[in-house]
Amino acid sequence: MTNTAAQLLTVLGQHWVLVTIGCLELVVATVLAAAILCGKREEKGHGYRLKGAERAFLSSWTGRTDEACLVFRNRDRLPVYAAGDTGKLLGVTLPEIQEDFAALSRHMADPEELEAGWKEYLSWDGKGIFGRSWEQPGGEWIRLSVWRDPSGEYDLLTFRRDTEYHRQLEESRKHLEEAHEASRSKTSFLSRMSHEIRTPMNGIQGLLTLAEGKLEKGSEAYQYLEKAQELSDHQLALINDILDMSRIEAGKVELEEKPFGLRALGNRLYDMFAKNLEARGIRYEVNFEEMTVDRVIGDELRISQVIINFLSNAVKFTSEGEIIVTFRQMMLRDHTADLMIRVHDTGIGMKPEFINRIFRPFEQESIETSKKYGGTGLGMAITDQLVRLMGGEIVVESMPGKGSDFSVFLHLPVAEEEGAFTEEKTEAPAEQGNGDPKAVFHGKRILYAEDNEINAMIARELLEGMGAEVEIAANGREAVERFETHSAGYYDFILMDVQMPEMDGRTAARTIRGLKRSDAEQIPIFALSADAFVEDERLSRESGMDGHFAKPVDYDVVGQGISDFLRRRGKQQ
């Protein structure tokens, strides 16, 4: 290292040697040091003249058009030195800048940018690096970086043409917006497809049900309709799974974090399957072991979806024996409960080699299994993805002919104001109308909001066939008006489509809940909608509805759901 270079480094201090600005590197630091040294040697007018090694070192910058620098003297904010071709890069020379710093604004796309940048620079505390970018006329971008020397006497301003960086940045922003738009379009498409597919499917299945009621059971025509109904059910199950899987893969499944009760969840799981399994002679229990907490924070609907999937498979593959659901608290630490929820069955079981493939989409153990038991092969893939989203894991144990155990392990925060977990034996659901879920409609006056004429006709015929009195409203606004027109208690409950003209079902539900009359808050309102995702159910409940049933409408499911709701409400009163 020459004596001159060593002297320059001494002036700068070690941390200046590490400064790198594009390809300026040590040269920039040397410029500042040279200017400072020159300030101690020779001054002429407003500038400084370099001597000896400094002049030779800086001569290599002559004509440089992509980078330049200025040295500012802080006591009078005067540019005392320039390196590089400021005229070609910035459009102004050092004398012009010395004469009037605002001359820079003539070469900025937004002149006000200079004033804003100058104020920000004047308020800078000199620590770190001050930076700013601006666009020049013609689309060129300039990047300014400022360092203050250790003595605080001088600032080094470096300018670099930054157009390529901004071009790449703009392209990245454009690609990001295109990706967001594609994602929004995919979500909108999935939602629209769900609605467009389910609405006619509701009509098809409803008409099949009406036609079956006109035929003698066991007749050839009746058997044809039964087969058509089975094919329709299979097609709908496939549509449901494909749409749900697509939403997961598109990243459009958002988890909810709200308090819920494990005991209440267990009761609902019991109610959903108890009657069916009891009729088949299969022992069914929901047990709680070593539980000290009840209310936890998580996505109750998604957790329910996972366990229901396990249970549905257990019901499908178990012809005798037992199905046991077990909630077990493994550990409680830092206000977080480590939980295991296991579904045990004594069904046909699985071969060990299939367990490794069970969570792949469209995987089934064999063609024979698919033909005998049906299914799409997507349920377990969806379940696995949901558990991963919740930060949990699934463990599967199974042997052919011995049954299967599906266990999900979750880590859920304990809700505040947690009460002690009380052991309470899950009871069989109360009988409603001699065990017929449709009996809940008998003798009831129902307000049904539905804009599709065919679906409205089908609903009226089916419900009146079950002994109900039905009034049809063509949209949400009409449903609100009919409710307001009649006295309190006139309707027993409301069935509400979601997507309707003039006023949608959720808005109608919120409007009814907000009315100043005695039954506005209490009348049961249930959504019957072609919007069938878990998020849709959540939106319906948030709007004030008491339940959400997906189209095509299965009135056995609807009747059972309404019965369960009325039974739970009766217990709370």
Image (spheres, rainbow, N blue to C red):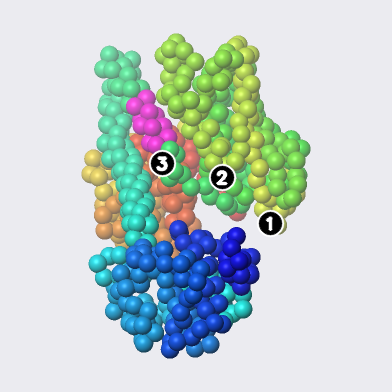
* Callout 1 amino acid: Glu
**15 to 439, vertically: above or below:** below
Work out how far the residue at label 2 is from the one at label 1, CA to CA, in angstroms: 16 Å
Magenta span of residues: 233-246
Residue at image mark 2: 300
Foreground of the two, 295 or 110: 110
Residue at coordinates 75% horizontally, 41% vertically from top-left? 331
Task: Tell me whether the residue at label 2 lies in contact with that at label 3, contact meaning CB atoms closer than 8 angstroms.
Answer: no
State the mark number for residue 378. Answer: none
Q: Which quadrant: the C terminus? A: bottom right
State the mark number for residue 250. Answer: 3
Residue at coordinates 60% horizontally, 31% vertically from top-left? 394
**99 to 236, vertically: above or below:** below
SS of the residue under disc 3: loop
Query: Which mark is first along the chain, 1 or 3?
Result: 3
Foreground of the two, 245 or 98: 98
Residue at image mark 1: 416
The quadrant in which residue 242 appears is top left
Residue 384 coordinates in the image, percent (x, y): 53, 32
Work out how far the residue at label 2 is from the one at label 3, CA to CA, in angstroms: 22 Å
Task: Tell me whether the residue at label 2 lies in contact with that at label 1, contact meaning CB atoms closer than 8 angstroms.
Answer: no
SS of the residue under disc 1: loop
Work out how far the residue at label 3 is from the one at label 1, CA to CA, in angstroms: 34 Å
Q: Which quadrant: the N terminus? A: bottom right
